[in-house]
């Protein structure tokens, strides 16, 4: 069966450091992988999308890598700030059964401390 | 531009009651979906729709019904609420291509007692 796995343990880092979050998947052959941010009590908000032929994508302090051989994406936040504290989810489109579905990982909670 | 609007924001039901969670989007998106989010379980897909008149089941469809009579609206019906349906429900919409972002509503926190 298709699975998307993220580290369920919270990641605590100090302000100014780089946070790295991992997303691993099995039984997918995705053309695209997405990352979202979710704050408590709110719906997820889209951050970045990376294509299978893109090794790396950047947006301001965010960097995403996509390794289709390892079936893994890494999400980096450089010069992290307390405002970056949130849960980060990766998501993939998968064709299972009768149609395409957008499936999310369980998310990793990031806490940036002063 | 309102995006995706969910109502109500909070709801308490008694076991056995039925109710409908409303979801509307004003972006003319073909694809709409419902997720539930529980601690430690992430977002789990309940039902989804690729256009008016077309719906399909997701990962956890039991106890829920949906319909899609218009592009804009995608209501989720709980037929006979159970405590196991206590959760936060999110509606999302996006264009029907893999390279597009999903837009989420603010969520409905449902408690079944």
Image (cartoon, coloured by chain):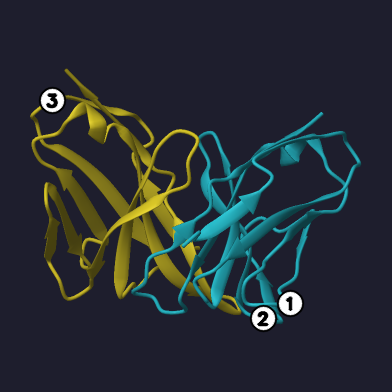
Residue B88 at x, y percent in the picture? 61, 41
Pinpoint the chain carrying mark 1. B
The hue in which chain B appears in the rendered picture of the protein? cyan
Q: Nearer the viewer, residue B31 or B22?
A: B22
Picture residue at 79% right of the left edge, 56% below the top: B77
The secondary element bearing badge 3 is classed as loop
The secondary element bearing badge 1 is classed as loop
Q: State the residue position of label 1.
A: B69
Picture residue at 87% right of the left edge, 48% below the top: B18
Query: Is A81 left or right of A91, judged from the image as shown?
Result: left
Q: Nearer the viewer, residue B14 or A20?
A: B14
As displayed, is residue B61 above or below residue B80?
A: below
Give the residue furthest to the top: A114
* Both labels 2 and 3 in a single chain: no
Q: State the residue position of label 2.
A: B52
Which chain is displayed in yellow in the rendered image? Answer: A
Pinpoint the chain carrying mark 3. A
Q: How many marks?
A: 3
Q: Quadrant of the C terminus of chain B?
A: top right
Residue A27 in sight from this viewpoint? no
Residue B23 in sight from this viewpoint? yes
Query: Is B96 left or right of A80, judged from the image as shown?
Result: right
Residue B38 at x, y percent in the picture? 58, 38
């Amino acid at each position: 069966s298709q699975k998307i796995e993220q580290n369920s343990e919270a990641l605590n880092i100090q302000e100014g450091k780089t946070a790295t979050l991992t997303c691993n998947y099995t039984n997918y052959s995705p053309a695209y992988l997405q990352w979202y941010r979710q704050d408590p009590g709110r719906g997820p908000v889209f951050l970045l999308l990376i294509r299978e032929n893109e090794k790396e994508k950047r947006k301001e302090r965010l960097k995403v890598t996509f390794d289709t051989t390892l079936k893994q994406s890494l999400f980096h936040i450089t010069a992290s700030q307390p405002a970056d504290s949130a849960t980060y989810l990766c998501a993939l489109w998968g064709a299972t059964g009768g149609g395409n579905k957008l499936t999310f990982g369980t998310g990793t909670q990031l806490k940036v401390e002063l | 531009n309102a995006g995706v609007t969910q109502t109500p924001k909070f709801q308490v039901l008694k076991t056995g009651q039925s109710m409908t969670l409303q979801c509307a989007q004003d972006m003319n998106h073909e694809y709409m979906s419902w997720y539930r989010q529980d601690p430690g379980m992430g977002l789990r897909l309940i039902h989804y729709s690729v256009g008016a008149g077309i719906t399909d089941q997701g990962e956890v469809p039991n106890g829920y019904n949906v319909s899609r009579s218009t592009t804009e609206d995608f209501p989720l019906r709980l037929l006979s609420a159970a405590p196991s349906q206590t959760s936060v429900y999110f509606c999302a919409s996006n264009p029907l291509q893999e390279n597009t972002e999903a837009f989420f509503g603010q969520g409905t926190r449902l408690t079944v007692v």
